[in-house]
Image (cartoon, coloured by chain):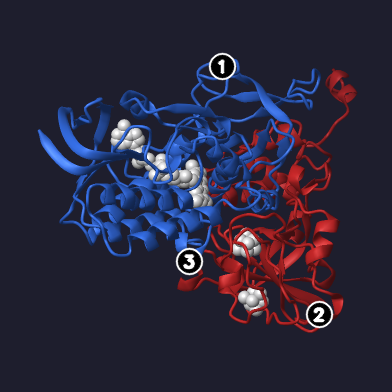
């Protein structure tokens, strides 16, 4: 059976940073990514990122992916990259099974860092299976990775950062965004994103939801309606909007199947997007040798995902005996960066969630 | 309220608007960023120290308008696109507003466009004075607009067609404006007949003699079709409006 020191499952920002930091400590690493390309969510992000310069603020997501890949290249003698390779399971003895290009294989690593990210939540309403109704992530992949327009006009559900950013990118691609709805009475995403969309004349309808989708073989129009403060539909407020695309962006939930299989202690924490693993300050779960970082550990941002990845990489390498003199310094730097990113008003929810999963 | 609508209120704006006296002295940055979020590129971009150092990355930017030179470095560095530079000394009647603009095609210097307010409502005609798009701006070009002076704190975005021509009447009989016509074409009404049916343009006393040509030109321009390839509207009899009774009365002398 193939072996490696550290297997990293998922090649997004968290996984790539974990690989770089573990390899820089001297560990032998294998990255396993189900897509053709590395980069995870970053390869779809054509907008400038927030955060501070340490986490590449003001740089576009796609360019951050390039920077990470360059760093990765510095340690190529120690990093093995498997793409088009989906991890199917982690067995209790630590063996990982993989499907790559229709072939089944197994690897036995000494430890694993799970960085599988998150998946999109969906909404229940009549006819939500009509062609033309997509998740925001799918729309972004269509547009920014494949260069295909999803349709002529879009109604967006969800005024969080993803809904707002994808709406802006749709406008940049020349597609008309007719309205952005959100069930909550407040805009959840950053207000600067909301304001830049409003300047283009796009309405943001808070306390609104989709009631019904119409169409025979594809979406033709949607009925929307207003909600009261208890999130109940207000009769008589229905109105129709003609559109061929409805884009749903109502949040993400951590992609944790592999952690359940590995037997990690899991907790339901709504602030972090759903079930997440309990972890110590080194990001090790309740199972020795199984680490987590990024959205799978709690839905947050690429900035924090990268710092968590770096932290998990450092700690996993150290646990296998790869110590460097500056370990403490690097370790503290990660902790400080994470604290600073989560210090504000927006990070309050995350802090509250993390308190409940600390081991 | 900003959190509900995404549009800054007058109170919000009052906190960040440079004083009249300061604006009268020359270009100055207006930072419309009101929420504590983990972000600071504006501060690191500012070389004059006008934007005070953040104690916490979540701080909202605090700017000393007197120290600001209006250099505009912060404008394209802001991922929230929430900074503009206004210069009320541009000319006797006009002010310059420099906005970040990440759309293609970029407007051309010298052309006229429509100035939009914070809700996207057309408010005035704006002349594109300059379009800056250097490598260091990293794909966030900055467009300088000359607008009427009293619009300097209102115009925050543009639409790439001329405000004046948008208000031009295309069909005098049914009072259809160029702006309305463009909106219809954008909605997918791509033939003279469709536009006629929805707007009644061409059904008035002149029977389309003034507007048919204009509508066709606009469809051609908007859809990138040659005039010759457009579907010609059906020329229904009669060629001039006649009272129904005239026809119902049968042929004279019958
Ligand atoms: C529209 C949008 C805008 C955003 N804007 C910002 C922003 O401005 N600033 C910011 O900091 N963050 C932003 N984010 C968030 C950021 O992209 C994510 O938080 C970040 O990508 C999380 O990184 P990750 O490595 O944990 O997960 P991901 O990037 O999701 O990567 C996970 C990877 O794991 C792979 N994978 C999953 N399961 C398996 C398996 N079983 N086997 C093999 N591979 C697997 C996936 O294919 C994927 O490549 C945005 C996100 C979106 C969607
Ligand atoms: S315009 Fe120039 S001087 Fe003024 S705040 Fe921006 S970067 Fe600083
Ligand atoms: S860069 Fe823009 S969004 Fe970020 S803090 Fe400065 S003004 Fe606000």
Q: Do residues under tags 1 and 2 come within 8 Å of each other at their CB atoms?
A: no
Q: Circle 2 sits in a helix, a strand or a loop, which is it?
A: helix
Q: Nearer the viewer, residue B209 or A85?
A: A85
Q: What is the CA distance from the residue labelled 1 to the residue labelled 2? A: 57 Å
For the N terminus of chain A, the quadrant is top left
Apparent side of residue A163 relative to residue A82 in the rendered image (left or right): right
On the image, the x and y values in percent for residue A328 come to 37, 60
Q: Nearer the viewer, residue A85 or A94?
A: A94
Q: Is residue A314 visible?
A: yes
Q: Which residue is mark 1?
A: A127
- Label 1: chain? A
Q: What is the CA distance from the residue labelled 3 to the residue labelled 2? A: 30 Å
Kindly report which numbered mark, 1 or 2, lies closer to the viewer in this rendering: 2
Q: Nearer the viewer, residue B221 or A237?
A: A237
Q: Which residue is mark 2?
A: B22
Q: Residue at x 33, y 49 (%)?
A: A315
Residue B138 is tagged as: 3
| Chain letter of the blue region | A
Q: Is residue B131 visible?
A: no
On the image, the x and y values in percent for residue B226 come to 52, 49
On the image, the x and y values in percent for residue B61 come to 68, 66
Q: Residues within 10 Å of mark 2 (few under 14, many from 20)?
A: some
Q: Circle 3 sits in a helix, a strand or a loop, which is it?
A: loop
Q: Circle 1 sits in a helix, a strand or a loop, which is it?
A: loop
């Amino acid at each position: 059976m193939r072996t490696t020191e550290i297997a990293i499952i998922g090649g997004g920002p968290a996984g790539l940073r974990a690989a770089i930091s573990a390899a820089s400590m001297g560990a032998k690493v294998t990255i396993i990514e189900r897509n053709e390309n590395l980069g995870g969510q970053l390869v779809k992000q054509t907008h400038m990122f927030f955060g501070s310069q340490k986490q590449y603020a003001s740089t576009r997501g796609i360019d951050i992916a390039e920077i990470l890949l360059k760093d990765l290249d510095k340690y190529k003698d120690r990093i093995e990259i498997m793409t088009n390779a989906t991890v199917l399971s982690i067995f209790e003895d630590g063996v990982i099974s993989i499907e790559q290009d229709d072939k089944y294989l197994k690897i036995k690593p000494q430890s694993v860092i799970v960085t599988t990210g998150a998946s999109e939540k969906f909404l229940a309403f009549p006819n939500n299976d009509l062609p033309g109704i997509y998740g925001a992530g799918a729309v972004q992949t269509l547009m920014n990775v494949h260069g295909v327009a999803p349709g002529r006009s879009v109604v967006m559900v969800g005024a969080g950062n993803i809904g707002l950013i994808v709406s802006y990118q749709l406008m940049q691609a020349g597609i008309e965004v007719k309205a952005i709805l959100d069930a909550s009475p407040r805009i959840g995403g950053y207000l600067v994103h909301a304001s830049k969309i409003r300047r283009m004349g796009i309405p943001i309808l808070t306390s609104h939801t989709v009631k019904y989708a119409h169409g025979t073989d594809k979406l033709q129009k949607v009925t929307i309606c207003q909600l009261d403060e208890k999130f109940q539909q207000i009769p008589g407020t229905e109105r129709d909007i003609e559109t061929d695309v409805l884009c749903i962006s109502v949040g993400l939930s951590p992609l944790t199947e592999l952690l359940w299989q590995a037997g990690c202690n899991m907790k339901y924490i709504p602030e972090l997007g759903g079930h997440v693993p309990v972890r110590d300050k080194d990001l090790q779960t309740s199972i020795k040798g199984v680490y987590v970082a990024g959205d799978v550990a709690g839905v947050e941002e690429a900035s924090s995902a990268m710092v968590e990845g770096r932290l998990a990489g450092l700690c996993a390498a150290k646990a296998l005996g790869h110590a460097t003199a500056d370990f403490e310094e690097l370790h503290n730097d990660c902790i400080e960066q994470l604290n600073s990113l989560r210090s504000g008003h927006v990070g309050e929810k995350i802090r509250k969630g993390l308190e409940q999963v600390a081991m | 309220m900003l959190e509900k609508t995404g549009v800054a209120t007058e109170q919000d704006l009052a906190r960040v608007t440079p004083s009249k006296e300061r604006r009268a002295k020359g270009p100055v940055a207006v930072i419309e960023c009101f929420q504590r979020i983990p972000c600071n590129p504006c501060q690191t971009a500012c070389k004059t120290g006008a934007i005070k150092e953040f104690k916490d990355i979540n701080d909202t930017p605090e700017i000393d308008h007197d120290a600001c030179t209006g250099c505009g470095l912060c404008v394209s560095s802001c991922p929230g696109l929430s900074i503009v530079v206004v210069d009320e000394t541009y000319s006797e009647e006009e002010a310059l507003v420099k906005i970040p603009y990440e759309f293609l095609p970029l407007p051309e210097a010298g052309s006229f466009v429509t100035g939009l307010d914070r809700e996207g409502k057309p408010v005035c005609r704006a002349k594109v004075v300059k379009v800056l798009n250097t490598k260091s701006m990293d794909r966030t070009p900055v467009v300088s607009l000359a607008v009427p002076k009293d619009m300097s704190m209102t115009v925050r975005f543009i639409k790439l067609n001329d405000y004046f021509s948008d208000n031009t009447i295309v069909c005098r009989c049914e009072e259809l404006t160029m702006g309305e016509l463009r909106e219809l074409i954008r909605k997918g009404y791509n033939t003279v007949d469709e536009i006629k049916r929805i707007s009644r343009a061409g059904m008035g006393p002149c029977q389309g003699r003034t507007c048919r040509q204009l509508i066709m030109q606009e469809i051609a321009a908007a859809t990138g079709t040659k005039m010759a390839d457009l579907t010609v509207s059906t020329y229904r009899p009669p060629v001039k409006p006649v009272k129904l009774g005239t026809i119902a009365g049968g042929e004279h002398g019958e």
